Image: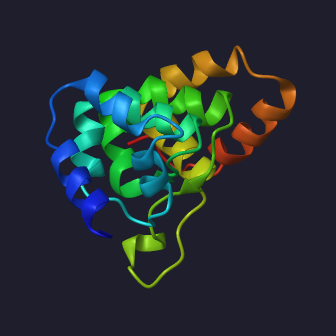
Amino acid sequence: GHKDKERFWDLLAKTQDGELFEKWTSKGTDMSRWVDSRDRVPFLPQLAQRFPKSLVSMVKAGVLKWRWYWLKDVLQLDPNLVLKTVLLFDYRSGSGPKKGYDPSANNQNLFETVSRWGWRFQPDIVLDLCETMGNGEIKALAEQLMQVSSRR
């Protein structure tokens, strides 16, 4: 029935096996199409903590869009992975948090949010990434970094 995939997702979300999770969520599978069809997918924050690389792979494959409610967990575990994927490899499909964390406000731009987060909390990683960026990428990043008022 129409609830089968939702029930299977609930089961899959409990797995501790990264290979099993990747097998069932890789691009082209029924579960990847189910994930892609939903605005909010249950258990992503927990899965982000268990399988950060798998979720980033799903973003790169176009199965999943960045969402702040789970992205912030991956940033805490593996900031280099997220910063490199967004800033260097240009995977920017998704959104940052609500402006002022107001539920009725619009979401912030993902690139702006991640660049500013990186500059505040992981400036060494951002500077390392700048060494491999082209001029256009550095200009876009510099515009965001110039708007950061403090690094804590």
Q: How is the image coloured?
A: rainbow
Q: Is residue 130 left or right of residue 47?
A: right
Q: Is residue 50 left or right of residue 100?
A: left
Residue 92, position as x, y percentages in the image: 63, 46
Could you say which is closer to the camera, residue 148 or residue 84? Answer: 84
Residue 106, position as x, y percentages in the image: 54, 76
Quadrant location, the C terminus: top left
Q: Residue furthest right?
A: 135
Q: Is residue 58 left or right of residue 133?
A: left
Residue 11, position as x, y percentages in the image: 16, 47
| Residue for point 43% across, 56% down | 34
Q: Is residue 6 above or below residue 118?
A: below
Is residue 97 visible to us here? yes
Quadrant location, the N terminus: bottom left
| Residue for point 77% across, 41% down | 140
Residue 64, position as x, y percentages in the image: 49, 48
Q: How many marks?
A: 0
Is residue 52 visible to us here? no
Q: Residue furthest bottom?
A: 104
Q: Is residue 141 above or below residue 135?
A: below
Q: Is residue 29 left or right of residue 72?
A: right
| Residue for point 42% across, 54% down | 35
| Residue for point 23% across, 52% down | 8
